[in-house]
Image (tube, grey):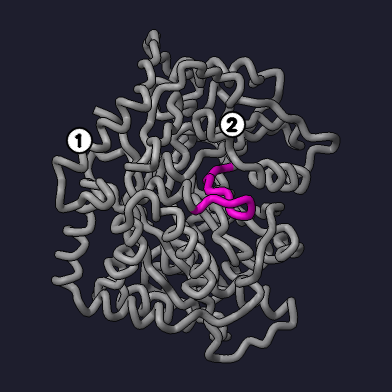
Amino acid sequence: MVDRLSPLDVSFLYLEEPTTPMHVGGVVLFQGTSETFDLDRLVHLIEERIALVPRYRQKIKWIPGRLANPVWIDDEDFDVTYHVRRSALPRPGTDAQLRELVGRIMARPLDRARPLWEMYLVEGLTGGRFAILTKTHHAMVDGAGAIDIGQVILDVTPEPQRAAAQHWTPRPAPSDADLVSAAVSEILRSPGAAIDALRSGAIDVRETAERIGRRAAGLAAAALTMARPPALNPLSVPIGEARRFGMASMSLDDFKSIRRSHGGTINDVVLAVVAGALREWLMTRGESVSSRSTVRALVPVSVRVGEESAGNHIAAFLVDLPVGEPQPVVRLHRVSFEMDQLKATGQMVGAQALVGIAGFAPPTLHALGARTANDLARRMFNLVVTNVPGPQFPLYAAGARMLGAYPVVPLAKGQAVSIGLTSYDGGVHFGLNADRDAMPDIDVLADCLESALIELLDTVPATDRAARKGTGNDTGPRRPPADADSA
């Protein structure tokens, strides 16, 4: 039985162009130096634990004639040292130098002839720190699983857990004749879906149709949103191949204080902070911002169920962020109200159905359909905002303490920036992936995120504020609090 890519997974391959590489990633900071953690130690950790993520020793093989979606096969020439690499910052090793390096590395596409991931050990950071940068193609993971290759090297204690030694023997790759035969057999077994030979896609379509039938109002709301293109602004511009990267860190307790004082969810507060930051950033550029100005964000949500771990299962909200609202608390209430309405009407289902259109097309038309969707992106939303909650206690890699994790979310065609954030050990860490030419002021937008949080925090009575804490650098382990919010 071949391990075939799903319609959504393969769409990320078809979406890929020189200006829109479809890999996700992360920048993870650690406390430690080359004397305590080096490339050999990182390679050893990967070799010892990569069996936990077998997909990372597999590559993609296409079906002759594109009769069906491609399949995953073992890479018989797998070489971990090709994927795990070393880089060092020149003195003084500042965070600005790290961000520049990240932008350059993330701009380069992955090698499709090999397993679709890379990892970089970046040495020479000030303050006795180092960084690990990961790149993984979106076809391999969804938003909640994008750091799987990074997770395998992490432990909850400074003392690494020993993994059982496992001998790996790659399975021989199927011949072209076998792949064609398997594709034809699938078509014959499912004559109703013979055009695309995507049985799993057909199941997804049927289930989506049933949900749409139950929530017709949700689909209507989604269609109405799609019919109203987002406002034109500096976020919706042609982009090139080069990238910039921005970073910002904040305290999770501050987000919780705002949530307790004004209601909503942690994710509502996050979106309100993003709205406030975009408002301030637009004004620094001299852009016209009226009381009715909005920026439309696509907010993906992982909908994996139970023990599922493979493939993409993504739903999404289309949220009009009220950047024209000058009052921060009103801005938060407007975000909370819109999110409640989207959840109540089922507009998430409508947006998911639109994303899942790729499942209707035969594989030979996926490229056209996916690229058309990419071309339409600027008329659907202005930017992507992802929020992935992480553990609220320290993690370690071979004894080196993890300080923070900053996501790198790919850009769609015609979109200048994407914003990802991960909460970890009391901190909230933003990663801003941006087009180099369109966003020379990416660090200004990062600063605006911090300003927008302070603006909201200033509306919380002093007696109700949580103690202002660091972002994961305090000593001693912390366990997840009982009132932790999900994204």
Checking the image for residue 185, the label placed there is 1
* Left or right side of 168 for 254: right
Residue at 63% x, 31% y: name it.
120
Residue at 39% x, 68% y: name it.
260
Callout 2: SS: strand
Residue 473 % position (x, y):
59, 41
- Judge whether 79 appears above or below 139 on screen: above
Categorize mark 1 by other alpha carbons within 10 Å: few (<14), some (14-19), many (20+): few
Categorize mark 2 by other alpha carbons within 10 Å: few (<14), some (14-19), many (20+): many
Sequence-earlier tag: 1 or 2: 2
Callout 1: SS: helix
Residue 223 % position (x, y):
33, 78
Q: According to the image, label 2 marks what residue?
A: 119
**Is residue 118 in the magenta section?**
no
Q: CA distance from mark 1 to mark 2?
A: 38 Å
Residue at 49% x, 76% y: name it.
321
Q: Quadrant of the C terminus?
A: bottom left
* Left or right side of 266 for 87: right
